[in-house]
Amino acid sequence: MNTQIAHTNGKSVIRLAGRFDFNAHRTFRDAYEPQLRDAQVRELEVDLGQVDYLDSSALGMLLILKEKAAASAKAVALANCRGTVRQVLDIANFGKLFRMD
C-alpha cells in the first residue's frame, strides 16, 4: 500500500492506494501518527478512493486510528468510499462510527 499526506486548513488527508490489509499496518501507522502529534491538525481524512482491497484487519486499524484521534481531540472521516470498499464498510456499520462520503 502507498500513502500520500496533504495538509489544508487544519485537516490532514491521508490518501491510500492499493491493498489495505494486515501487511499495511506499519505504513498506515507511520502515516497517521505524525498527524496525531501535530497540534495544528484538527481533523484527519482517510481517502480510500484508490484502495482496491480492504479486509478486517484494515477495519481494525481504522478503529484504532479513531480511538487515538479521539484521545487527541481530533476528528476522523473516511472519503471516496466506493465499490467493494464501500460494501465492506457498510457491512461493518462504519457509517455509524465515521463520517463517510
Image (tube, rainbow, N blue to C red):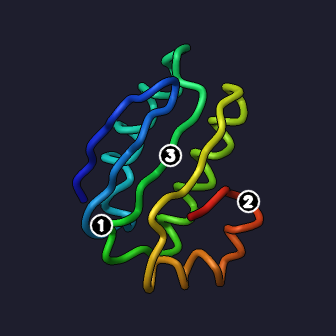
* Mark 2: amino acid: Leu
Q: Residues within 10 Å of mark 2 (few under 14, many from 20)?
A: few
- The percent position of residue 77, horizontal first and vertical second, equals 59, 50
Residue bearing mark 3:
45
Q: Are marks 3 and 2 in contact (CB under 8 Å)?
A: no
The image shows residue 26, relative to residue 33, as above or below, that is: below
* Mark 3: amino acid: Glu
- The percent position of residue 78, horizontal first and vertical second, equals 54, 57
Q: Secondary structure at mark 1?
A: strand
Of circles 3 and 2, which is in front?
A: 3
Total count of labels: 3
Q: Report whether 79 appears left or right of 68.
A: left
Earlier sequence position, callout 3 versus callout 2: 3
- The percent position of residue 82, horizontal first and vertical second, equals 45, 77
Q: Which image quadrant is residue 2 in? A: bottom left
Q: Which mark is residue 67?
A: none
Q: Which image quadrant is residue 18 in? A: bottom left
Residue bearing mark 1:
50
* Mark 1: amino acid: Gln
Residue bearing mark 2:
97
Earlier sequence position, callout 1 versus callout 2: 1
Earlier sequence position, callout 1 versus callout 3: 3
Q: Secondary structure at mark 3?
A: strand
The image shows residue 49, relative to residue 64, as above or below, that is: below
Outermost top residue: 39
- In depth, the one of 85 and 49 nearer the eye is 49
Q: Residues within 10 Å of mark 1 (few under 14, many from 20)?
A: some
Q: Are marks 1 and 3 in contact (CB under 8 Å)?
A: no
Spatial CA span between label 1 and label 2 = 21 Å
Spatial CA span between label 1 and label 3 = 14 Å
